[in-house]
Image (cartoon, coloured by chain):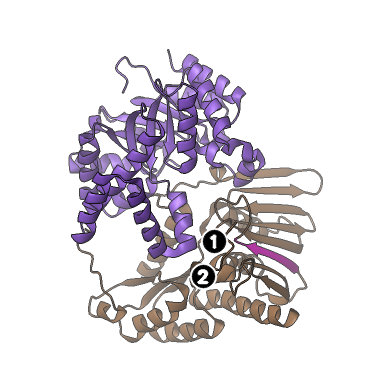
Amino acid sequence: MNNEGKKLLLVGDNPFHGISHLSQERARVRGYTMTYPEHAANLVMTSLENGADGFMFSVSELSLSILRTIHEMGGGKRLKLYAIVPYAFEYVRLAAQVGMAGLIKKFAKQIVVSRNLKAIATGLKGVVRTDPVALMKTYLLYEISRIKSSDKKANLDSVLLHEIITDMALALDLAWLFKSYVDFVSDLGIRPGFNTRNFPYLAKKFREWDIDWRETTVATPFNKVGFQMNPSRTECERALSNPHEGNIIAISVLAAGYLEPTEAIDYIANLPNIKGVAIGVSKEQHAYETFKLLKDRLGF
Amino acid sequence: MLDGVHVVDDVGKLSGLDLDVVYVTTPIFSHSFVTKNVYSRGIARNVFVEKTLGSSYEEAKGLCELAQNFRGINMVGYMKRFAVTFRKAKELLDQETLGEVASFEVYGYSSDFFGINKNSKASSSRGGVLGDSGCHAVDLALWFFGDLQVDSAQLASLSNGNSEDSAYFTVKTSSALVGEFSISWCMENYRLPEFGLVIKGSKGIMRVNDDELELKLDGGKSFTWYRHDLNDNVFFWLGAPEYVREDEYFIKSVLESSNAEPSFYTASKVDYIIDQIRCRAGKDE
């Protein structure tokens, strides 16, 4: 991920989905412009020009449109992609509207329509044998094919499991899910990753399950005010300071806009073992200033 | 797939497992049936039921009586009470920071069915907008201000069917405090469900929602708290911190044999208000 000690700088996609963890009101005030693929693609391109290396995004129709637009703008080749699956919001909303059975039917139909033969075959096997690992593989193949069909030249560095899956699987102690996920995604030549809000617990379980940190990416909140750092900022920092060679990407660095960029980035700069940072930007000026600041403060 | 987890297709098959606690998280229409079985078959004495307790006040009242006979700990999942912003608001109200409360407005909005024009089965299985999200708004108001009586009510179906998609109603308390509620799951741009209150008192005004609390006192002093300022961390994050706090509190109550709130009895008041709204809306139409 970063061989020369250079930190990986990623543009996060939360603002493009109308998300603000500080206040939903703030996201509404930003308006619709943020959710236009062209606008978002421009922001990603500006960030790239000012030091960003890639894009961390939830796999949704919107983010795939952004990828297509970036590709058309000629930015795809140098863009490292960090995809988070599933885009939980999309599935939860669908389940709310059509129920769980409706959601499953719709999803199965999408896989068939995608004509991804490997996914269809694995899916059938999963259904016939009620094999959860086969079903998980089907789902991953489907999502990866969606990304690759949006940009055939995409550098898909890592696919991360959304926190809703990671943290639920952690709570249920599902070692098999973590291990089969790591094995399957690694075999595809992609780095498996996990998005979590329980970093110390994940670290403890990885040690217990003998999962090799070096093979994975972990995206987790790190910020000066301990926002979304559970059980506490101190515990998260302690888990980070344990020597390992994991690829930890700090997210929620600005604590959803609660912190000023300078103080937020200074905090990150002083943490050990952080390999990268993902930050969302909502305006051209933000994109320019934030990534310039990241470059300056993170010691390029 | 889940080691040590029994999966059964009939609640009666949970008998004899020596369970300490049962969580009833089935659709609302089945809460009464499942919970009655849990008690009557001796499956567990301690029961947590997701909101709403019943699909009517009659059902909720029946469950309250049953629970009383079994003397276990019971609770209903009104998790907004465990969100740090609403807790802070309750604390400020209890300290009478706003002075005497004169009026309040409550909203509960989401985009769950925004742009959906056909009648959805899922919307009725979720108990309509009142059973799904309106109940949280009502519970918060009951928690903050005490017992309420419905004054007027309007319900609307935006899909031209029988679904209950939005509600507007007014309430009053025994101390003549008046409140207005606006509930809808067809609002544009509410990516996540959001609940909020504007409370006017003799000493100022308070605005609170899931994310922040703003207090403006007469004389110009004002304060804002975000989740960040209110110690929102939990020992293990799952979904949202309020769910974890709610679970932790219920389990602690069971272990210490202490009453948990909102109990069945407290939560049945929400079912009562929802019945009142539906009844009143029928009369007001």
Tell which of B165 and A279 is nearer to you.
B165
At numbered mark 1, what does the secondary structure look like: helix, strand or loop?
helix
Q: Is residue A226 visible?
A: no
Is residue B111 toward the left or the right of residue A51 in the image? right
Horizontal and vertical percent for residue B245? 45, 57
Q: Looking at the figure, which quarter contains the C terminus of chain A?
A: top left
Does the magenta-highlighted stretch encompass residue B183? Answer: yes
Residues at marks 1 and 2 touching, judged by CB atoms closer than 8 Å = yes
How far apart marks 1 and 2 lie (CA) works out to: 9 Å
The residue under label 2 is which amino acid type?
Pro
Q: Is residue B9 visible?
A: yes
| Residue at image location 36% in from the left, 26% down from the top | A153
Given the current orientation, which residue lies at the most extreme right position?
B219
Quarter of the view holding residue A107: bottom left
Q: Which residue is mark 1?
A: B81
| Residue at image location 50% in from the left, 78% down from the top | B54
Q: Looking at the figure, which quarter contains the N terminus of chain A?
A: top left
Horizontal and vertical percent for residue A67? 45, 32
What is the display colour for chain A? purple
Q: Earlier in the sequence, mark 1 or mark 2?
A: 1
Q: Which residue is mark 2?
A: B262
Quarter of the view holding residue B10: bottom left
The chief SS type of the magenta part is strand
Does the magenta-highlighted stretch encompass residue B57? Answer: no
What is the display colour for chain B? brown
